[in-house]
């Protein structure tokens, strides 16, 4: 099941005709072709590790960046139904659960108190390295469906977000200790020989959009609101594994096995536990440093809710078919008229 990587990585009719998805259909796609029939079962083959190289990134990153921003599609099957190779985050585990805001906020949409949504997440690592004890950059992308009905009959447009720890990499051994933000630090020198890949990625996203290191959150604050209704969006979001979650031991442990072990017992297909993340927001953040060493300083983080995952899968479709829209940069995050890209083109073009 080798995913496609060629000129079709750009926007296709599949992207242009997107009008929403059914939660049940996306889940069905994710669980259709797991790498291990039952995770952790004896004699299971090892999870594949998809390679990231400067050549693969530099040859297709600009088209991939434009597609990531322009396409709202939740699933991108491609002409042979095998999807597309992710150029930067090819190794991941998909999670299924709910998003819930429990505290009062001044924000709109699904940042308001009492908001609950079905959610699909993809926990991944930037580039090739997946093992504990090495430099890697852990990340969680999320997709919110504005319903709690898992069998909702009609397609729904989703709200997507992206969070990550230091884009250059970190030595976070446990997912429990990772701080995932929509505005991560960047330490390019930690990439070592992969620094050229990092620079190529940043350059492509800057050419396609504007701010390669920040992903705004307005899709969530606009979810469920009427078009033209004034909205208010937090500037920064941080996700951290809840303090009550266990720490999964194991030298050289692959992060995908670590995530799966939070929910499953090896060799048992039935979920046994949940994996919870705390949602924190703030509007106070200051950035410093050159582009190759970005540092953020935040104040007044406030916990407003949680994400609870009760199922997970490591699959081909989870690596090659599911898609998370990257919201285009807005000069004013609450004003759609200030968007950098409109109808597939940069406004300045």
Image (cartoon, rainbow, N blue to C red):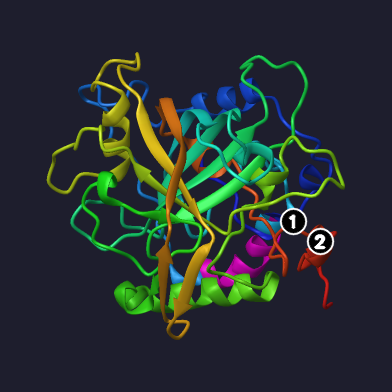
Left/right placement of residue 275 relative to residue 291 reads left
Left/right placement of residue 82 relative to residue 331 reads left
Residue 70's mark?
1
Which residue is tagged 2?
A: 344
Q: Residue at x 45, y 35 (%)?
A: 306
* Residue placed most toward the observer, 306 or 114: 114
SS class, disc 2: loop
Percent position of residue 278, x then y: 40, 40
Q: As displayed, is residue 303 above or below residue 22?
A: below
Crowd class of label 2 (few under 14; some 14 to 19; many from 20; radius 10 Å):
some
Q: Residue at x 61, y 20 (%)?
A: 148
* Residue placed most toward the observer, 46 or 224: 224
Quarter-wise, where is residue 29 in the image?
top right
Percent position of residue 330, x then y: 72, 65
Magenta region includes residue 59:
yes
Q: Which residues are magenta?
A: 57-67
Q: Residue at x 74, y 30 (%)?
A: 156
* Residue placed most toward the observer, 255 or 220: 220
Residue 50 visible in the picture: yes
Q: Residue at x 55, y 65 (%)?
A: 214
Percent position of residue 89, x then y: 46, 54
Residue 80 visible in the picture: no
As drawn, which residue projects farthest toward the bottom? Answer: 290
SS class, disc 1: helix
* Residue placed most toward the observer, 340 or 67: 340
Spatial distance from mark 2 to mark 1, Cα to Cα? 5 Å
Quarter-wise, where is residue 315 in the image?
top left
Magenta region includes residue 301:
no
**Residue contact between numbered discs 2 and 1, judged by CB atoms under 8 Å:** yes
Percent position of residue 50, x then y: 40, 51
Quarter-wise, where is residue 18 in the image?
top right
């Amino acid at each position: 099941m080798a995913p496609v990587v060629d000129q079709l990585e750009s926007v296709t009719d599949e992207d242009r005709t997107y009008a929403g998805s059914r939660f049940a259909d996306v889940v069905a796609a994710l669980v259709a072709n797991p790498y291990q029939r039952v995770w952790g079962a004896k004699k299971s083959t090892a999870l594949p590790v998809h390679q990231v190289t400067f050549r693969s990134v530099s040859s297709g990153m600009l088209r991939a960046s434009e597609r990531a921003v322009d396409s709202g599609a939740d699933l991108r099957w491609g002409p042979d139904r095998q999807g597309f190779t992710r150029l930067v985050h090819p190794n991941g585990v998909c999670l299924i659960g709910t998003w819930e805001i429990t505290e009062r906020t001044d924000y709109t949409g699904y940042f308001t108190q009492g908001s609950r949504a079905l959610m699909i997440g993809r926990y991944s690592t930037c580039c090739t390295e997946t093992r504990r004890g090495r430099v890697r950059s852990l990340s969680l992308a999320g997709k919110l469906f504005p319903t709690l009905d898992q069998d909702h009959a009609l397609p729904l447009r989703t709200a997507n977000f992206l969070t990550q720890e230091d884009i250059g990499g970190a030595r976070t051994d446990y997912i429990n200790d990772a701080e995932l933000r929509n505005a991560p630090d960047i330490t390019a020198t930690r990439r070592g020989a992969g620094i050229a890949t990092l620079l190529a990625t940043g350059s492509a996203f800057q050419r396609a959009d504007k701010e390669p290191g920040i992903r705004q959150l307005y899709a969530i604050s606009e979810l469920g609101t009427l078009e033209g209704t004034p909205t208010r969006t937090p500037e920064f979001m941080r996700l951290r594994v809840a303090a009550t979650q266990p720490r999964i031991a194991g030298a050289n442990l692959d992060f995908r096995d670590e995530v799966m072990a939070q929910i499953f017992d090896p060799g048992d297909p039935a979920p046994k536990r949940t994996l919870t993340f705390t949602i924190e927001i703030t509007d106070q953040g200051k950035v410093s440093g050159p582009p190759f060493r970005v540092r953020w300083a935040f104040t007044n983080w406030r916990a407003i809710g949680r994400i609870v995952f009760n199922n997970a899968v490591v699959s081909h479709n989870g690596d090659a078919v599911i898609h998370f829209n990257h919201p285009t940069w807005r000069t004013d995050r609450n004003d759609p008229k200030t968007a950098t890209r409109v109808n597939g083109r940069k406004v300045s073009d």
